[in-house]
Image: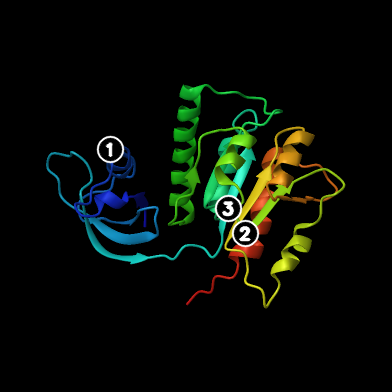
Amino acid sequence: MHRFFLPPGAWAEPALSADESHHALSVLRLGAGDRVAVFDGRGTEGTAEILPDPNRRGARLRVIHSAKTPPLPCRITLAQAVPKGKNMDLIVQKATELGAAEIAPLLSERTAVSYDASDAAAKQSRWHATVLEAAKQCGQNWLPEVGRPMAPKDFFAGRGRSFDLMLVASLQPDAWHLRDWLADWEPPAAPPRSALVLVGPEGDFTPAELGLAKAAGCRPITLGPIVLRVETAAIYCMSILAYELLGRVKKG
């Protein structure tokens, strides 16, 4: 069943947006009577039927039934230094598929790109579209929040120590393996309900930025003996955190 985004405010008189309607009616050739899956990005998913619309103004729907999906047991935030090229798009896509609750783009001193206010807003909109497409494909009912690009110091100034577990990927010799830090939450301790992981740009964070992260409470983690590309490091970190912190969901 094809899956479409139906914003929370649109469920009273459900109709797909212009872009979603175009995809449903013109690209997929769906029509009146066809059923589709809809989700609101805040945990609600349902089955809907496309209603007849002789004016072809868009896809009007009748929601047949809906259900609420609980949020994942740990809210994971990926604070990612924006890499060059289109690699951020890939990182945003994969972070969504791996259960990130938030993606915070960072502009570190070694970031190879820079944005003015207009560019930053455009990038944020593009990354949100990437999140939406990834969520539609993978069945994620909770859309990650995507922030505007900002410097690490501004990120920490606004967030402080607001996470149970705070990590920073590091090439420095004081970095520990993630499982060593997670030992603090071995039973009977309650597992972390929120986690932050910072991944640096090409060339890693500067010593000053690593010091800033550590001062904010981030624990340095190693990603192994091989130096990874930025996008690989982000996917690696999200995969490990998803396995360790999100794998406690029981089905049935």
The answer to whether residue 98 shows anywhere in this view is no
Q: Nearer the viewer, residue 48 or 241?
A: 241
> What percent of the width, then of the height, locates residue 139?
45, 57
**Left-right relation of 45 to 185:** left
Q: Are marks 1 and 3 in contact (CB under 8 Å)?
A: no
Residue 85 versus residue 20 in the image, above or below: above
Amino acid type at image mark 3: Ser
> What percent of the width, then of the height, locates residue 79?
61, 43
* Label 1, label 3: how far apart the Cα atoms are: 38 Å
**Left-right relation of 1 to 179:** left
Q: Which of the 4 image quadrants contains residue 183? A: bottom right
Q: Nearer the viewer, residue 181 or 245?
A: 181
Q: Are marks 2 and 1 in contact (CB under 8 Å)?
A: no
Q: Are marks 3 and 2 in contact (CB under 8 Å)?
A: no
Q: Which callout, 2 or 1, points to the residue nearer the camera?
A: 2
- Farthest left residue in view: 54
Amino acid type at image mark 1: Ala
Q: Nearer the viewer, residue 151 or 82?
A: 151
Badge 3 is on which residue? 162
**The label number, if any, that marks residue 164 in the structure image:** 2
**The label number, if any, that marks residue 133 in the structure image:** none
Identify the mark nearer the N-term, 2 or 1: 1
Q: Residue at x 76, y 34 (%)?
A: 208
> How many neighbours does mark 1 have within 10 angstroms: few (below 14), some (14-19), or many (20 or more)?
few
> How many neighbours does mark 2 have within 10 angstroms: few (below 14), some (14-19), or many (20 or more)?
some
Q: Which callout, 1 or 3, points to the residue nearer the camera?
A: 3
Image mark count: 3
